[in-house]
Amino acid sequence: MIKKVPLVLFSGLLTLSVLTVSGYTGFSGNNNATHSLYRIADTVPKAEVIAVVTIAINATNTFDEQSVANLYTPNAVVADDEPPYSWNGPTAGIQWVNAVEKAVKDFHISKFKGKIEPVNVYQETEENVYVIVPVSYTGDLPGHARFTARGAFAFVLRKTDDKWLIKSQVWMPEKGMNN
């Protein structure tokens, strides 16, 4: 079941992106009347939103789990390509940072660092944000080999008590997008 969470989440995000190509999403009942209509548009990212995702991503540079302790909603989901592949709840970010730290130690990577690249996908409603954040991870492996991993995080943030919190965070490695 846990292995299906990233697939279900990715499928839902893909469906949402297909529905929003025209800039609108609508849900209609059996009588085909639209019950709700939301205006969704690519906009310039809000500094307060980018600050939250930057803290989350940069936490893996120093394995600072405390910096992410209050960044996730009570029902947050984080998915990554490190076992156990998904973490849930308000401590999902802490669990994820710990899993990344374990992988870095297991593979003896030194000078591990994530670098955030320019954001090109940012959609916002009054209470939610969808943002794709490209990231490049680098480091040194034993024997002078170089570690590099490129990909992107898909984040959904939700406005809770006038504060942006991470609802979901999914890592997609670049190699996962190649045919």
Image (cartoon, rainbow, N blue to C red):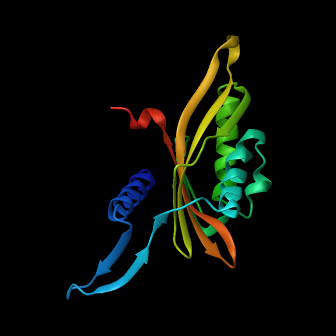
Point out residue 4 in the picture as x, y percentages from the top left corner.
Answer: 40, 53
Quadrant (top left, top right, bottom left, bottom right) of the C terminus? top left
**Residue located 71% across and 34% down the image:** 113
Q: Closer to the camera, 139 or 46?
A: 46
* Extreme residue toward the left, this view: 31
Point out residue 73 in the picture as x, y percentages from the top left corner.
Answer: 63, 68
Residue 102 in view: yes
Determine the image quadrant of residue 10: bottom left
Quadrant (top left, top right, bottom left, bottom right) of the N terminus? bottom left
* Extreme residue toward the front, this view: 44
Residue 80 in view: no
* Extreme residue toward the top, this view: 143
Point out residue 126 in the picture as x, y percentages from the top left corner.
Answer: 55, 76
**Residue located 32% across and 78% down the image:** 27
| Left or right placement of residue 22 versus residue 148 in this view | left
Q: Looking at the image, is 30 positioned above or below residue 2?
A: below
Q: Closer to the camera, 14 or 47?
A: 47
Q: Looking at the image, is 143 positioned above or below residue 74?
A: above
**Residue located 65% across and 62% down the image:** 46
Point out residue 147 in the picture as x, y percentages from the top left corner.
Answer: 62, 23
Q: Looking at the image, is 127 positioned above or below residue 137?
A: below
